Amino acid sequence: MSNDLLGLFLSNNFYVKNKHLIALDFFEDESKKIWRSIELGHNKYERDLTPLEVEQILFDEFSTMTTSQVHSMKTLTRSLPKDIGEDIASDVLMSQFKKYFGKKLAELGIEIMDKGTQDLSKVNELIEKYEENFMPKIGNMEIAHDVYSLLKANEDVSKYRWNLKGLHNLCQGIGPTIFTAVFAMVETGKTSFLISAMFGPNGFMEQGAKCMILANEEKQERTGLRAVSSLTNMTKEAIEHYPDKAHEIWGEYGKRVVILNSDNIRTMEDLELALAKHRPDVVGIDQLDKIEIRGVYAREDIRLGEIYRKARSLAKRYDCAVIGVSQASAEAEGRTVLRFTQMAGSKVSKAAEADLVIGIGKEIEEGTDNFLRHIYVSKNKIGGQHGTCTVVIKPEVSRYVD
């Protein structure tokens, strides 16, 4: 990039509007230092900068430069012009950015051909990072605001209804683009809740949804058998005695089910490939926290927050409902009301990314399980209601019932 265009970024307004079009590959080594100094200046002071101010920031940030390098940088910073119109500069930047993007995409294509890889995650990452830059720039569009149009626009939010009356009263259901986080202590019945919602009576599958479930807590065959059990109301022993009956009931439903395990899906990139291939309507991930994600993170809560952000992004990209199951923290032990601050590994970073957060609590009476489960909705961006409903778990058939 020429210094003519770089000088325009001294304007805070121009910087804010156009910084997303800049990649470090645009610059030679010396100009990279100037761009970094401009970034630091705008982020700290949030106002227009002068060439001399950029120069002082640069020398403070890169204090180990030689005398000749200092002289060279002074020559560059003091020659930063602003004699190009911002409208023309924006168009030139977009043109250069598209060339940069095309070059990067071509490099990935060559890498795929040379290595014969089937991993498209780097391509997806590049597109996800920059796709908004290719969106047409349009003015604000007024939506149709009559009652019937508004109702129609929101009808898919609860397309698939919860099959528990109490939960349905709090939140009617979930639909495309909705990300739900479900959490509970160990041995509470998290997997049973997921299976029951998907495959139990009047569950998502009976409502017509194509369901995909990722089971990394147990073998996928075990999860599949529990799905059959939930649908048919037959225990594992009953299915073994009457397999023909179970097969007949499962029948056509089984054609709309995809069950995978952690051997197939280890990373968020693997999950995205599976979504692209199978195109499910509802996706259950047991457990979401165990999915790996690229990057280095300073803290565990930041890493978990990024996993949940990605899950929400995938729900929107593939127009499906995603349900992520995870553990509750130790402070939830013995509690019946589990709030989103009690999700394991994170006070708020996971819950911040979810549209709906459901905690499942249980009582312990002298070391025995009374099979009552207390479902608490602590975040609800769909309907706004929060509260608790009490249900019964039937673990032998992986069902939750009113």
Image (spheres, rainbow, N blue to C red):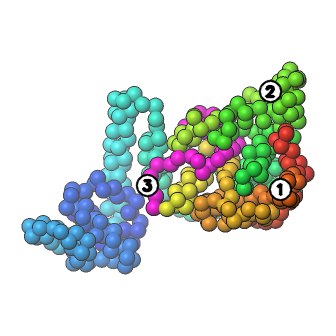
Q: Is residue 358 left or right of residue 76?
A: right
Residue 368, given in percent of the width and then of the height, sits at: 85, 54
Name the residue nearer the viewer: 15 or 223: 223
Query: Can you identify the residue that label 3 sits on?
Result: 296
Q: Is residue 337 visible?
A: yes
Identify residue type, mark 3.
Val
Distance between mark 2 and mark 1 Cα atoms: 42 Å
User: Which residue is drawn at the image coordinates 68% and 50% (left, top)?
Assistant: 325
Q: Which mark is residue 350?
A: none
| Quarter of the figure that contains the N terminus | bottom left
Q: Is residue 297 magenta?
A: yes
Q: Position of residue 72 (x, y in %)?
A: 12, 67
Q: Residues within 10 Å of mark 1 (few under 14, many from 20)?
A: few
Residue indicated by mark 1: 367
Residue 287's place in the image compared with 70, above or below, is: above
Q: Is residue 184 magenta?
A: no
Q: Position of residue 167 (x, y in %)?
A: 83, 56
Q: Where 397 falls versus 144 (above or below)?
A: above
What secondary structure is marked by label 1? Answer: loop
Dot 1 amino acid type: Gly
Q: Which numbered disc, 1 or 3, marks the residue that appears first in the sequence?
A: 3
Judge depth for marks 2 and 1 and give the one in front: 1
Pick whichever, 192 or 316, lies toward us: 192
Q: Is residue 104 left or right of residue 338?
A: left
Q: Name the residue: 33% across, 71% down.
A: 40
Q: Which residue is mark 2?
A: 252
| Magenta span of residues | 273-298
